[in-house]
Image (tube, rainbow, N blue to C red):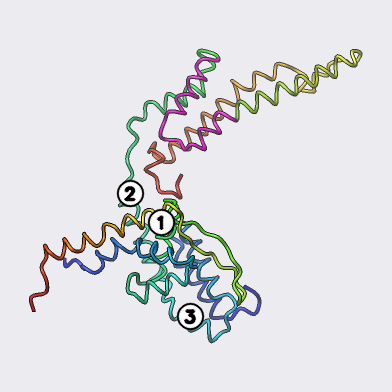
Amino acid sequence: MTKTTPQATRDYLARLAAALSDVQPDVRAEIIAGVREELDGLDAEAATARIAELGDPTFIAAEATAATLAAEQSHPTEPSPSRTLPIIAVLLLIVGTFVVPVIAPIVGLVLVSFSAVWSRREKLATWLIPLATAVILVVAFAITSAVQAEVPTVPTNPLVPLASWHLAILLPYLVLPIEGIALLVRANGRGWRTVRSLPEWRR
Amino acid sequence: MTVDVGTQLRKGVVEYCVLGLLSREPMYGWQLSERLVTSGMIASIGTLYPMLSRLRSQGLVTTYNEASASGPVRKYYQLTARGAAQLESFRLQWEPFTATVLQLVGKDSS
């Protein structure tokens, strides 16, 4: 779309975008992109003819809404078999460390992996984030130890946090609880339904 | 309330018609829309794109972009192996299915 785009094309795209405002975002974007691609490069006369073929934006929007609703109904949302397991899983991540250190959060991670309310990507991230944090802390600790060993006269600066192994506490008391809260918010936002039962755009 | 028989029938088969069209060649949205609207299978692109989105999420079609001779870059839809298998399964069932239905409902008596 350039400055030479006919007024009719610009008007039609604006009307289409407004009419589609209540349609699922991904479907809305696809329709607008499809129409834009079709009208792109056409002069005013050709664009007007093509617009007449495309039809009224409100009709297109009504059809898109109906088609999307029909798809959701034919793929009914099923409730999660039980909310208990996923809720226990996030609670173990959030407060487990305070109750049974190490074991409770690991059990929480395993329960998350077996729950159907989170996607495979979310489960993977739940494992990888604490692992990556642990690796970063170990590497940072090894580097600072090596530096201090080489230059023993340099006093430990308490203001440089990476110099301290105490930072390992971040993992159980900060990273895992934050992960638990994030998983809780996501699952709750989806009504604790199984990921499989959700339409693609909500996963 | 009178049920529109044509609408109900189209709903059941239109996705397979898209797969059938794509089995011949990859097509872009407007091409598909024009073909399906002309055949009376859909009323507008409003029905087409939610369907394409669904077919893509089921892994039956994929997309790629290609610049056209007249300028705009077009998004082409093409059949995946899974889509081809789904179409084949439909083709195998369609003829016996229509034959059975025809037998059951009988031919036009006029």
Q: Is residue B101 left or right of residue A15?
A: left
Amino acid type, residue under disc 2 in the picture: His
Q: Which mark is residue A49?
A: none
The image shows residue A177 at horizontal and vertical percentages of 55, 26
Chain letter of disc 3? A
Real-space CA distance between mark 2 and mark 1, rounded to the nearest whole angstrom: 22 Å
Q: Name the residue located 89 percent from the left edge and 16 percent from the top edge.
A: A150
Real-space CA distance between mark 2 and mark 3, rounded to the nearest whole angstrom: 34 Å
**Which residue lies under the disc numbered 3?**
A50
Task: Please tell me whether residue B66 is drawn above or below residue A115 in the rendered image.
Answer: below
Q: Which residues are magenta?
A: A102-128
Amino acid type, residue under disc 1 in the picture: Ala
Q: Toward which corner of the image does residue B86 lie, by quadrant?
A: bottom left
Check the picture and name the quadrant holding the N terminus of chain B.
bottom left
Q: Name the residue located 54 percent from the left edge and 76 percent from the top edge.
A: A39
Q: Name the residue located 33 percent from the left edge and 64 percent from the top edge.
A: B14
Disc count in the image?
3
Secondary structure beneath disc 1? helix
The image shows residue A88 at horizontal and vertical percentages of 42, 23
How packed mark 2 is, by other alpha carbons closer than 10 Å (few <14, some 14-19, many 20 or more), is few
Amino acid type, residue under disc 3 in the picture: Arg
How packed mark 3 is, by other alpha carbons closer than 10 Å (few <14, some 14-19, many 20 or more), is some
Chain letter of disc 2? A
Chain letter of disc 1? B
Q: Are marks 2 and 1 on the same chain?
A: no
Give A90 or A113, whichever is nearer the viewer. A113
**Which residue lies under the disc numbered 2?**
A75
Q: Are marks 1 and 3 on the same chain?
A: no
Question: Of helix, strand and loop, which mostly describes the magenta segment?
Answer: helix
Check the picture and name the quadrant holding the C terminus of chain B.
bottom left
How packed mark 1 is, by other alpha carbons closer than 10 Å (few <14, some 14-19, many 20 or more), is some
**Which residue lies under the disc numbered 1?**
B84
